[in-house]
Image (cartoon, rainbow, N blue to C red):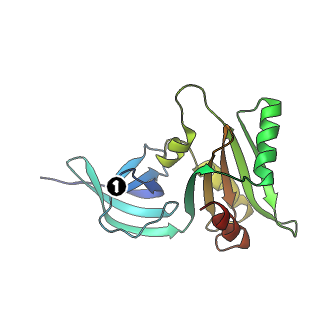
Amino acid sequence: MSEARTTGEYRVRSRTPDGAGFVLVPLDGDDPVRVEDDGDDLTPGNRVRATLAWTDGTARFEDYEVVEETRITYVGGATGLFEDALDVMEEARREGLGVNSRTTYSTDGEPNGAVYAFADQPGERDLYTEFRDGTAPLEPLLDRLDDFENCPHHVFVLDPAEHDFLVLYLVLRRDSVLERTVLDTYA
């Protein structure tokens, strides 16, 4: 039996729903890939350079290297949303926008992140699931964050319990006070 191999850069978007693997999104724009977990030490959000070995349609890591330690945290049923998120949602609602965003700032007036609010989608679309399974694009938003500072970020995907919007909070710097605050509040 022959194995096919593919090599490229990927964003680890999530664990698979059954916990037995990872969902990877190729940075070249191809479709998401499910990769079996053979004890790999990866975290959702990591950008990896990897070689995948394919056997009978199943992908496994032959080799990988983490090239960026960005993180993604998914929070379903989030409560107690922060003021910027509520303001961005209200502005989107008032103006009839499907998506709205705003840069957030530290108490010193320095950019420290960006909050995006996506209105509920028509029909059966579930944006929370689309971000987890890699079918909703995330890289363009991370690229915009890199314009402020090219460093590992932390993306929080918040599915509010009491609002009809999905909130993405892209925290500029990992290991920052803001990241710890958001983790303590929602994760």
- Disc 1, SS: strand
Give 141 or 147, whichever is nearer the viewer: 141
Question: Total label count?
Answer: 1
* Residue 127 in the image, given as x and y percentages of width and height: 56, 40
Res 9 quadrant in image: bottom left
The percent coordinates of residue 10 (x first, y second) are 46, 56
Q: Residue at x 34, y 61 (%)?
A: 51
Specify whether 53 is left or right of 26.
left
- In depth, the one of 23 and 186 nearer the eye is 186
Percent x, y for residue 75? 57, 54
Figure quadrant of residue 181: bottom right
Residue depicted at x 62% and y 56%: 156
Question: Looking at the figure, which quarter contains the C terminus?
Answer: bottom right
- Judge from the rendering whether residue 176 lies leftward or rightward of residue 77; answer left or right: right
- Mark 1: amino acid: Val
Using the image as rendered, state which of residue 158 and residue 149 is in the foreground.
Answer: 158
Report the residue at 86% width, 68% height from top: 107
Q: Residues within 10 Å of mark 1 (few under 14, many from 20)?
A: many
In the figure, 173 relative to 84: above or below?
A: below
Q: Which residue lies furthest to the top in this view?
A: 123
Q: Position of residue 64 (x, y in %)?
A: 38, 67
The residue identified by callout 1 is 35
Q: Nearer the viewer, residue 92 or 45?
A: 92
Q: Residue furthest left?
A: 1
Q: In this rendering, is residue 25 above or below 119?
A: below
Picture layout, residue 179 above or below residue 163: below
